[in-house]
Amino acid sequence: MLNTNSCLNRFNCFDRGRVAIFIDGANLFYAALQLGIEINYTFLLHYLTSNSRLLRSFFYTGVDPKNEKQQSFLLWMRRNGYRVVAKDIAQFPDGSKKANLDVEIAVDMMTLVDHYDTAVLVSGDGDLSYVVNAVSYKGARVEVVSLRSMTSDSLINCADYYTDLDLIKEKIQKSSSLR
């Protein structure tokens, strides 16, 4: 595995071809909280696709249908280059809430694998290691972008390239300018 941070410019490391982006919304949200930043999703999309041909960018998230602010955000995402894949948040007897979208991410990665050259997975979830391996076996490159402290070693080890969000936060946060 090549650490993309060792390249002067990660996009000059190799021809990335057609790129498909798969963003685990909850994972990215908690990573941004940990970093103390707010993500600018336009900057993020530009960063992840720079000098590449975008096939599609997916954003996976749990939703609360009663949360108007969240609904407005998801509408903005749909209108600005993201295909939003959402499912209602389930509330458990202990009061915790969760919407697991790992299966949706895995199915979409495998369904589209013949149409992209590079998959960019924005998640640190080790449960996705198996699909990353499967996509690699089909011939696509896989880049993982996530916060190191929240990323499974198994996911990093099976990816072709890894980028730590902490190293690119200035390029993707709301208060930054597009570089």
Image (cartoon, rainbow, N blue to C red):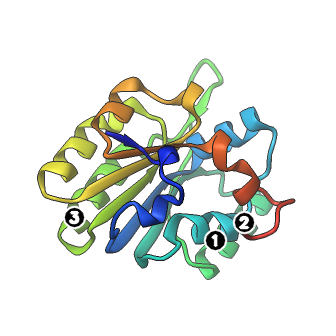
Q: SS for tag 3? A: helix
Q: Which mark is residue 77?
A: 1
Q: Which sits earlier in the primary sequence, circle 1 or circle 3?
A: 1
Disc nearest the viewer among 1 and 3? 3
Q: SS for tag 2? A: helix
> Is residue 39 in view from this perspective?
no
CA distance for labels 1 and 2: 6 Å
Q: SS for tag 1? A: helix
Q: Which mark is residue 25?
A: none
User: Looking at the picture, does residue 120 appear above or below residue 162?
Assistant: below
Report the amino acid beneath label 3. Answer: Val
Q: Quadrant of the C terminus?
A: bottom right
Residue to which mark 3 is pinned: 113
**Toward the viewer: 159 or 99?**
159
Q: Are marks 1 and 3 in contact (CB under 8 Å)?
A: no
Report the amino acid beneath label 2. Answer: Phe
Q: Which sits earlier in the primary sequence, circle 2 or circle 3?
A: 2
Report the amino acid beneath label 1. Answer: Met
Residue at 48 percent across and 52 percent down: it is: 7
Q: Are marks 2 and 3 in contact (CB under 8 Å)?
A: no
Residue to which mark 2 is pinned: 73
Query: Are there few (<14), some (14-19), or many (20+) residues within 10 Å of tag 3?
Result: many
Residue at 32 percent across and 52 percent down: it is: 142
User: Looking at the picture, does residue 64 appear above or below residue 117?
Assistant: above
Residue at 73 percent across and 32 percent down: it is: 34
Residue 104 percent coordinates (x, y): 35, 53
Q: Are marks 1 and 2 in contact (CB under 8 Å)?
A: yes
Residue 116 percent coordinates (x, y): 27, 71
